[in-house]
Image (tube, rainbow, N blue to C red):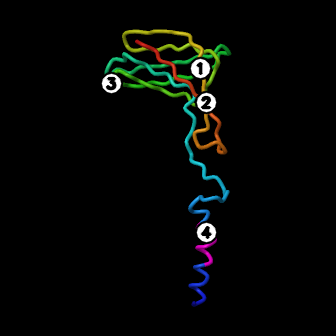
Amino acid sequence: MTRPRALLTIALVLVAPFASGCGVVGPTACTLIGCTGLVIEVTGAPGSTPVTVVVSAPDGSTRSTTCTSATGTCPVSFPDFTPASVTIRVSTATQTIEVTRQPMYETTRPNGAECPPECRNARVTVVL
């Protein structure tokens, strides 16, 4: 056996268990999925009309965004905002609704048990 071929054979023997995942504990490959945080799903949104969503926590911190929906549903995400209680104000050109909710957060690790980040995610539906 030639020297390059012998080195290739040795390399394959050493690498094969890692590539197959069989019985060898190796480094964990992490993906880059982020947290969704607090998701507000507005239903009954008028088509092609901007919808403004403002969320406020009891400590006075707020976040806001605008979305437009062709389907009547307008989900918006606030990844870095996870208060225990939140007041949600949804406005269009013709109407405004305000509700207070206590989101039920679920703790997840979207990239795997050993990978960051640890997320607190919740979804709240507001009907216009």
Q: Quick check: marks 3 and 1 in contact, CB under 8 Å? A: no
Mark 4 belongs to which amino acid? Val
Earlier sequence position, callout 3 versus callout 1 = 3
Earlier sequence position, callout 2 versus callout 3 = 3
Q: Quadrant of the N terminus?
A: bottom right
Q: In this view, does 50 lie above or below 96?
A: below
Location of mark 3 (residue): 71
Mark 3 belongs to which amino acid? Thr
Mark 1 belongs to which amino acid? Met
Q: Quick one: SS at disc 4? A: helix
Image depth: mark 1 or mark 2 in front:
1
Q: Quick check: marks 1 and 2 in contact, CB under 8 Å? A: no
Earlier sequence position, callout 3 versus callout 4 = 4
Distance between the alpha carbons at the discs numbered 3 and 4: 50 Å
Earlier sequence position, callout 4 versus callout 2 = 4
Distance between the alpha carbons at the discs numbered 1 and 2: 16 Å
Give the left or right position of residue 93, taking residue 21 as reference: left
Q: Residue at the front extreme? A: 23
Image depth: mark 3 or mark 4 in front:
4
Q: Residue 15: say if magenta.
A: yes
Q: Is residue 115 above or below residue 122?
A: below
Q: Residue at the bottom extreme? A: 2
Location of mark 2 (residue): 80
Distance between the alpha carbons at the discs numbered 2 and 3: 27 Å
Earlier sequence position, callout 1 versus callout 4 = 4
Chief secondary structure of the magenta portion = helix
| Res. 104 mark | 1
